[in-house]
Image (tube, grey):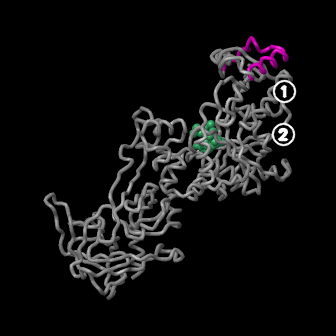
Amino acid sequence: MAANSEDKTTQTSTENIREIPGVNFIRAQIRLDNDRGTYDGRVCTRFPPEPNGYLHLGHTKSVCLNFGVAAEFGGQCNLRFDDTNPTREETEYVDSIREDVRWLGGDWQDREFYASDYFEQLYAHAEELIKMGKAYVDDLSADDIRKYRGTLTEPGRESPWRDRGVEENLGLFRRMRAGEFPDGTRVLRAKIDMAASNLVMRDPTLYRIRHAGHHRTGNKWCIYPLYDYTHCLSDSLEGITHSLCTLEFVNNKELYDWVLDTLNVYHPRQYEFARLNVTCTILSKRKLIQLVEGGHVNGWNDPRMPTLCGLRRRGVPPGALREFCALVGMARVNSTVEYAMLEFCIREYLNGHTPRFMAVLDPIKVVIENYPEDRVEEFDMPLHPEDDSYGSRKVPFSRELWIERDDFRFVPPKKYYRLTLGSEVRLRYAYFITCREAIVDSDGKVTELRCVYDPQSRSGQSPDGRRVKGTIHWVSAVHANSAEIRLYDQLFTVKNPDNAPGGGTFLDNLNPNSLQTVRGWLEPALAALDPGARVQFERVGYFCKDRDSTPEKPVFNRTVTLRDTWAKMEKKDQNHE
Ligand code: ATP
Ligand code: MG
């Protein structure tokens, strides 16, 4: 996995970390630990998703960070499913997470772990805590526990069950495990401090009763450990060195440390980094699920979804996402990144990694009057204008072509170098043509352009040094394949869908025009591509062949539009002359 670029804007310094310019704080911490021999030079991280939904753009940051630093320091990164919640987790999600992490370039080798693998050990540690007098069974209801907890300004109250003896606690906890009590009637809590200033430390719940089947352990358990208790012990059992999580867990760190210190087991350290937020989208599994279940999109892998499977289907390459994460960096302060920055990374990456083809999405017919009716020529065209290693493809040329409707105007605006009546343009890699006549239907819509070509201008070369400024793309009408083209746009119309100026929820801010489907014409070479192939349609944008494609009906998704392509191309063509 590509290493993240160093973040030069780290503002925080903790007691241990010297500010090292150009080094993000997590790498700085690892170097410090390696220098001191804290873990004998070992680096072991983990990516710990809860299998209750599909991975999204936000998870990319965590995947890139955890796998990235492990790779950089010659360490290892585990994939650990945090599956402590029996009802919400499903095997479908486990499979998708595996696929998505692998797609991003994360390699956990044979280290695929599940928190549920540790249930037996977690249980044994809980009994240990009880025996130490550090945990007790509480009969308060969930509501009462909340009421007793107090607030930031008021200390909590101790539960009347807090001082049960060890034997009584052990007996009750064993009976909880044996299934003798209904859901919600008792919990196991850590006995810490109901007056702690950190609310997390006010006797947090460690276990609760849930008579529910689990996707891996079936009906073996009816008590389930909570996240804070499970996470630190899972890290400890796996020998994690640096446990990297997002900032909302800052307050949980004290509990993380308490559990491991109290049990006196191997103790990884937790470090928090900022969550990735991106404008014009939402990154929360709970909300993404509403888009799917409400039918606002066509499933988790709808190309408009910020899920990894959606981005993949849209044609976003994993390398572009890794570069995006590198660019975002590892700041410790939460911030929101512009969606345009993601698009920039996708465009940059695709520019260097995709072959070029021609496709016309909004066609007008061009008839070249002086080109013989039954003649067909083949032009050899490079698949990439700057990289010969892509090779070339053959493109047929004939008397009737499709060109883009927007490439003809009766009344050309300033600096419009495309086709107008009487003007000459270059057909990309083919010939110069001059428009003689435009045929218009009763609505005033152009249906056909009658043109002539200069046979001397073969392969788009000027025969006599005469300058032709504009170059347009085209496809031969008899050879073209018709295709369904899905033009995707932002799923939301506002920068912050959750908190838009007009109010409402994110569902009120959906873009009604986020998908527009058109029928386009493709050059024949595109037929040979497999679904998933990413291409540039010259002057139009980057596209990806969709899995819905059939030989009769290819389907392409627009990944991103091009920016400035028009300007760039004119420059290039002028340089050719
Ligand atoms: P969500 O809010 O979407 O449900 P989550 O944090 O509950 O996300 P988990 O499956 O628990 O999702 O996350 C797995 C890992 O990915 C965690 O370490 C979490 O901190 C990290 N992660 C999740 N969302 C982001 C994000 N937006 N930016 C960076 N890391 C994230
Ligand atoms: Mg979570």
Q: Nearer the viewer, residue 313 or 421?
A: 313
- Magenta region: which residues? 153-177
Quadrant of res 87: top right
Q: CA distance from mark 1 to mark 2?
A: 16 Å
Q: Is residue 533 visible?
A: yes
Give the percent coordinates (x, y) of residue 340: 48, 53
- Say what amino acid the circle numbered 1 marks: Glu
Instruction: Label 2: state its secondary structure.
Output: loop
Q: Is residue 23 magenta?
A: no
Q: Going 21% across and 70% down the picture, which residue do you hit?
A: 449
Disc 1 crowd rating (10 Å Cα; few below 14, some 14-19, many 20+) is some
In magenta segment, residue 161: yes
What residue do we see at 35% from left, 51% from top?
A: 516
In the image: residue 537, left or right of residue 200: left
Q: Position of residue 133 (x, y in %)?
A: 84, 21
Q: Residue drawn at (63%, 56%), measured in percent from left and top?
A: 105
**Picture quarter with the C terminus:** bottom left
Q: Could you say which disc has been placed on residue 128 in the image?
A: 1
Q: Which mark is residue 10?
A: none
**Mark 1 or 2, nearer chain start:** 1
The kind of residue on which mark 2 rests is Tyr
Against 566, residue 3 (above or below) is above
Q: Please indicate whether residue 558 sits to the left or right of residue 332 in the image.
A: left
Circle 2 is placed at which residue position? Answer: 266
